[in-house]
């Protein structure tokens, strides 16, 4: 496929996605589908940002919800305190809070590797959870922040469910484009080099610690966008947004979908949210299904759904 | 003050029991078992069921580790063995196991908070230093110390202990010497799981039985092994002895910052000594 065709296809796919509430409005369950798809996209943003660490740089972070939560709290608290629902202000607060937090945590975390990186990110995220839980004046503690205002921009009001969906979908597309740009750049290639052979990258003259830290901050900032969208979607921010289950949800999405691609984590997020939100109405042990799926993918198909798809495609063509 | 000190020590003893299994598994297999909290919770629920049926706390304390240990014994060859050498994937696999255990328990036993009554004979208080103190917490201290002494003896004096020490030092070499390493790993995982279950039963009368207890237990056991040192018995003892009182006093003295404080300690220990205060100097990737 040449560049033009790819660009045209991307624009078309983005347009189809963003206008989902319009063309699905005839369906009986359009409202429900819109809500589910909206939440899938929010989780996909979190999973995609995590995959920049897991897939590209080979950094298995089990505390990514900390930055999601920082974005959610950041956007909600700033809007609440300033009494201003401006979209750019909210997004700026979310990205600023999550990037700053990622910088602080990253300074420590990126010095460790492998299992120790995993435990360190888990410990730091739990620390953030503890702060969110106990700083009742700021975060509402265990009650959370209810009644979060949805944002507006230049007279555009994102309060309605369709408008909000369009906002979420647009920002999802933006995040995908940013990550696509990052991955195809020299910087993105350097991150992959980090995963493949850190020692060699250092020998080539790369400052690997700085490389890892910058990836950690970028991934954190993008997760913060997801967090802000989550707060606006649910009109609610709570310690659930910074807890371990949310980090695990993102990690499971990345691994089920397949690491190291833009499609994988998004597909994984769709599968995970389907199992968590739609499946429970028919079977009561949905979480078990998710756990078993995760086990099967880790043990037998580490390349994820995307990897399986690629292998099948290759076999059909051969 | 004396009460708080005793509370801290009894919490530390519980943490030691909880962390010993996690540390054993890591020392031998280089796997951080993130299903450890799941095994802990399963132990508590098995004991709850036994107590509801028979009223026998001690039977629960016996059956829970047996059942959970058998589960661990089955999981190692079925799942973890396939991924031997891929430590990170093994760790991820245990996340899946913990999801399944947590959900199935909620499905079978319900999702409300339950309590396990104190066992008969340990359900009263005794006067200590001018205040009443619950006997059960003293029992937890004694139980933890007894277990530590037993472990130390097994570790130093028995053939199993020699195998464990050798396996922690260099498992491939042990296999090359003709030891059945598959059996050793399966046994290790089973014993580690059983220890988590023991901790779950012991903790149940004090902290209750509820969904989410698995995450709490996992976090605390990780804290203890990280602070004390992964993979060594003395590390689990030191971690328990340090974190139990620190957590208890932290909550009394600075209730606002206690949680964050503990994690800050963990982060700094990990940074300065990635293998913990008394850990081995080998970093698995």
Image (cartoon, coloured by chain):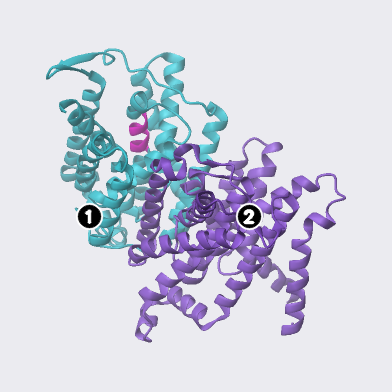
**Chain painted in cyan in the figure:** B
Q: As rendered, which of A53 and B22 lies closer to the eye?
A: A53
- Residue B123's quadrant in the figure? top left
Q: Are marks 2 and 1 in contact (CB under 8 Å)?
A: no
Quadrant housing the N terminus of chain B: top left
Same chain, labels 2 and 1: no
Q: Position of residue B276 (x, y in %)?
A: 24, 55
Q: Residue at x 47, y 60 (%)?
A: A98
- Point out which mark residue A310 bears: none
In the visual, does A263 lie left or right of B86? right
Q: Residue at x 52, y 49 (%)?
A: A246
Badge 2 marks a residue whose secondary structure is loop
Give the chain letter at badge 1.
Answer: B
Toward the bottom, the furthest residue is: A204
Residue on which disc 1 sits = B279
Badge 1: few (under 14), some or many (20 or more) residues near its Cα, within 10 Å? Answer: many
Q: Colour of chain A?
A: purple
Residue on which disc 2 sits = A151
Numbered disc total: 2
Q: Residue at x 39, y 39 (%)?
A: B216
- Above or below, B196 relative to B184: above
Q: Position of residue A202 (x, y in %)?
A: 36, 81
Residue B105 appears in the picture as rendered: yes
In the visual, does A235 lie left or right of B58? right
């Amino acid at each position: 496929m040449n560049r033009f065709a790819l660009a045209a296809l991307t624009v078309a796919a983005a347009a189809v996605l963003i206008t989902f509430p319009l063309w699905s409005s005839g369906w009986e369950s359009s409202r429900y589908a819109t809500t589910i798809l909206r939440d899938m996209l929010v989780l996909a943003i979190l999973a995609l940002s995590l995959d920049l660490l897991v897939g590209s740089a080979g950094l298995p972070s089990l505390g990514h919800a900390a930055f999601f939560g920082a974005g959610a709290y950041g956007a909600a608290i700033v809007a609440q305190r300033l009494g201003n629902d401006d979209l750019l202000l909210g997004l700026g607060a979310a990205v600023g809070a999550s990037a700053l937090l990622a910088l602080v945590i990253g300074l420590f975390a990126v010095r460790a590797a492998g299992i120790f990186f995993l435990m360190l990110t888990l410990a730091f995220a739990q620390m953030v959870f503890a702060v969110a839980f106990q700083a009742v004046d700021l975060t509402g503690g265990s009650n959370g922040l209810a009644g979060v205002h949805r944002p507006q921009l230049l007279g555009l009001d994102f309060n309605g469910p369709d408008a909000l969906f369009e906002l979420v979908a647009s920002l999802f597309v933006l995040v995908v484009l940013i990550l696509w740009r990052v991955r195809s750049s020299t910087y993105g290639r350097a991150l992959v080099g980090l995963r493949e052979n850190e020692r060699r990258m250092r020998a080539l003259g790369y400052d690997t610690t700085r490389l890892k830290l910058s990836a950690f901050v970028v991934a954190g900032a993008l997760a913060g966008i997801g967090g802000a969208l989550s707060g606006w979607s649910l009109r609610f921010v709570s310690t659930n947004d910074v807890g371990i289950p949310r980090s695990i949800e993102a990690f499971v999405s990345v691994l089920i979908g397949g690491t190291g691609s833009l499609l994988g984590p998004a597909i994984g997020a769709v599968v995970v949210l389907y199992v968590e939100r739609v499946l429970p109405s028919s079977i009561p042990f949905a979480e078990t299904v998710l756990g078993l799926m995760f086990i099967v993918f880790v043990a037998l198909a580490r390349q994820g759904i995307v990897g399986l798809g690629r292998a099948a495609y290759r076999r059909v063509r051969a | 003050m004396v009460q708080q000190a005793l509370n801290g020590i009894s919490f530390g003893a519980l943490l030691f029991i909880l962390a010993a299994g996690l540390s054993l598994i890591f020392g031998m297999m280089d796997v951080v078992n993130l299903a450890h909290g799941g095994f802990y919770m399963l132990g508590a629920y098995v004991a709850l069921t036994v107590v509801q049926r028979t009223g026998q706390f001690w039977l629960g304390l016996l059956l829970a580790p047996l059942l959970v240990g058998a589960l661990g014994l089955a999981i190692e060859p079925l799942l973890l063995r396939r991924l031997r050498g891929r430590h990170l994937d093994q760790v991820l696999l245990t996340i899946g196991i913990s999801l399944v255990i947590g959900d199935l328990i909620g499905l079978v036993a319900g999702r409300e908070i339950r309590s396990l009554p104190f066992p008969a004979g340990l359900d009263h208080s005794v006067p200590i230093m001018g205040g009443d103190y619950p006997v059960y917490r003293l029992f937890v201290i004694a139980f933890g110390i007894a277990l530590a002494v037993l472990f130390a003896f097994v570790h130093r004096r028995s053939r199993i202990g020699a195998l464990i020490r050798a396996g922690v030092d260099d498992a491939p070499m042990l296999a090359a010497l003709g030891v059945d390493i598959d059996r050793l790993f399966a046994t290790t995982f089973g014993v580690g799981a059983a220890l988590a279950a023991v901790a779950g039963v012991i903790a149940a009368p004090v902290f209750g039985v509820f969904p989410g207890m698995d995450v709490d237990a996992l976090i605390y056991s990780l804290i203890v092994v990280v602070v004390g040192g992964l993979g060594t018995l003395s590390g689990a003892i030191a971690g328990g002895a340090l974190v139990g009182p620190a957590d208890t006093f932290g909550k009394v003295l600075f209730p606002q910052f206690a949680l964050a404080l503990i994690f800050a300690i963990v982060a700094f220990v990990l940074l300065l000594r990635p293998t913990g205060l008394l850990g081995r100097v080998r970093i698995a990737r």
